[in-house]
Image (cartoon, rainbow, N blue to C red):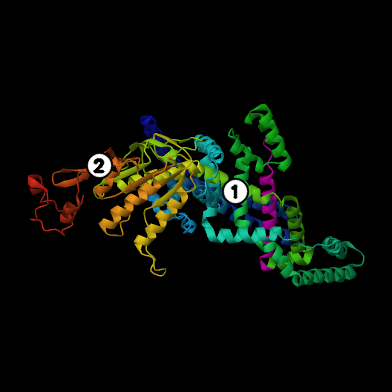
Amino acid sequence: MDGENVSRNTRFQSEYQKCSEECLKKTEGVKDLCKRVSRWRMLVFVFIGMSLYAGYQYQPAFYWGAAAGIALFLRLIWRHNQLEEEQGYLEDSRAVAEDYLARFGEGWKRFPVNGEQYLSGDFPEARDLDIFGKCSLYQYICTASTVWGQDQLALWLKEPGRVEDMKSRQQAVEELAQKEGFSREFEAAARRLRDIGYQDAKDKMGDFFQRLEREEKDSAARRAGIWMFPAMTVSFLLLSLFGPEGQVATVGAAVCVMLQFLAACIFYGWNHKILSPVYKMSQVIEPYQKLFGLLEQEEFESPYLCGLQMESGEGGALQRDTASKVAGGKGGVGDSKVLYGKKAFASEAFGELERIAGSIATSHNPYGFVLCNSLYLHDFHCVERYLGWKEKYQMEIKGWMEAIGKVEALISLGVISRTKQAHTMPHIADSDCPKFSASDLRHPLIKDSLAVGNDIDLSHRVVVVTGSNMSGKTTFLRSIGINLVLAYAGGFCTALRMCISPMELCTSMRAEDDVNAGISTFYAELLRIKHMIQVSKKKRPMIALIDEIYKGTNSQDRIFAAKETVKNLSQPYAFTLLTTHDFELCGLEQDPDTDAENYYFTEHYEQDRILFDYKIRRGRCRTTNARYLLRMAGILNENAVLPGSGQDGAERKGVKDFP
């Protein structure tokens, strides 16, 4: 199995490198083509000018050449825009491939999306396990570009929900992991949304939905007026050109133009309030339209993905109910596929909104505002089109966008399967009894060349982990915690096998003092431990991870307090894993009232260097290395004899440098 994962991992790395190179090559070709189209556009523009001049000076037949030139000029503009869009997509595709390549090394630590905004006091495990923030799990796996996707991924990492929810997400994540092409295309389609920034995008979405939910007052008289006045203006203009009373018609046209422009100015504030949120959204509408198109056209098997696809398909609640009945009655998700088929619904709605936003943009040009509103009350017509769009789709928009966010979050939870040699979809046992076992368990944020896997099968309620400084104790605890977070979210874990049950996760690793609140480091840790004990009183499955228990107080009090804490947490429904340098706590294994076992990490020495293998072993640690580390740092005198070192210590006196 390990060999298969290594081969698959190497294949993915090769594919991403090839994809990046191909996108770069194609981008250069598109750029060259863009330049040629631009040159032709300039030549055609000159030709149009010359044809108009020749038609005016010499022969009206030249006007036909000008007309043909204008048609060609418009065609070249369309082609140029198409090429620019293709170039942008290729650049986004290359950026996606480059991000995956960065995850094979340390480059991912520079990703701008790190989830720092989700760090909060009510979820201390996020800091302890590096879930959010710089160099975090979120920064490593998040491929979401929409605010909905980023928020959804954070929510699943914090609040995974019921076992049924976890398992349904697992099926969806596994299916998307197999759909490599779809996943990369989906990421690329949303990529440009990252340029907006999380808070800016959040504000724009907030304004858009606030206006969307507001009831707009409309009247039949206004609707009649916005069609009547433009019709009158056009009629007067035609009469002024071809009618017998040209001067009268000209005056009438001028009056209509003035009245329309005056109305546009008077109602500018009202129109602007309605249209401004749509205009601000214009940058994100096209990517969303592409995302909906991709979601609607793909075929899925997992019920969760089929449900998300249905959210963006035609039929609404009635269709969902019908699909549920068919799937339930015939026992297969495939039976319900015929209900939502291929017909785009959300993508068409956003295509219509994109056209409305494009029309609104015309009024943001001063000349466009004057010309369009004077001739046919452009702003009023934009409002009319938007209100009609709003009436049709208002109730569906939020559900559609949430569906896109969930697909993005599911793709993110599959990142581990494409970048880590050791990965597995964990088995989540629906059990009231806590379970945890894993083979080759690794920390997902350590690159493969440095990561060391460990096997662990928790059969006792309390695990005491001892070991020398830097030997791997804390990393081992974090490996358990961060993989549990991934598993409960529905994602792949960095192990070859993992079997767990739903448990409430509590940690005490980076308890910090708070000068303003008068809280010391020791008291901060006490509060964490107090929370664990309160959780244990609920008598529900839980797992507690405690690093260097009570390190903020003296050794005598620390050992006494640690033993009492362990006795409180030693319950049949709880796992407690703690690391310590106090070997006295290893005696808990002999305590008849405490179901405990000892594990340890150790080190060895080669050529005056201290080395670690980071492998966990059964039993208690027998070595210490603090004095050797002091000597390496130059703090301890080089000629000092290390207690208990004997001849071996004399041979190590020359150790000076840190490994």
Question: Does the stretch in magenta take in 356?
Answer: yes
Q: Where's residue 307, x and y in %?
A: 63, 39
Is the C-beta separation of discs 1 and 2 under 8 Å?
A: no
* Residue found 38% across the figure and 32% down from its top: 7
Q: In terms of secondary structure, where does tag 2 sit?
A: loop
Residue 543: which disc? Answer: none
Residue 549 pos. (x, y %):
33, 53
Give me the disc on residue 620: 2
Question: Mark 1 against mark 2, which lies toward the viewer?
Answer: 2
Above or below, 608 relative to 377: above
In this picture, which residue range is highlighted in magenta? 341-366
Q: Answer with left or right where residue 597 lies relative to residue 251.
A: left
Nearest the viewer among 487 and 361 is: 487
Task: Quadrant for residue 376, please give it.
Answer: bottom right
Please state which amino acid type lies under the numbered disc 2. Answer: Arg
The one of 139 and 545 positioned closer to us in this rendering:
545
| Residue marked by disc 1 | 82
x, y percentage for residue 335? 66, 29
**Is label 1 in a helix, a strand or a loop?**
helix
Local packing at callout 1 (Cα closer than 10 Å; few below 14, some 14-19, many 20+) is few
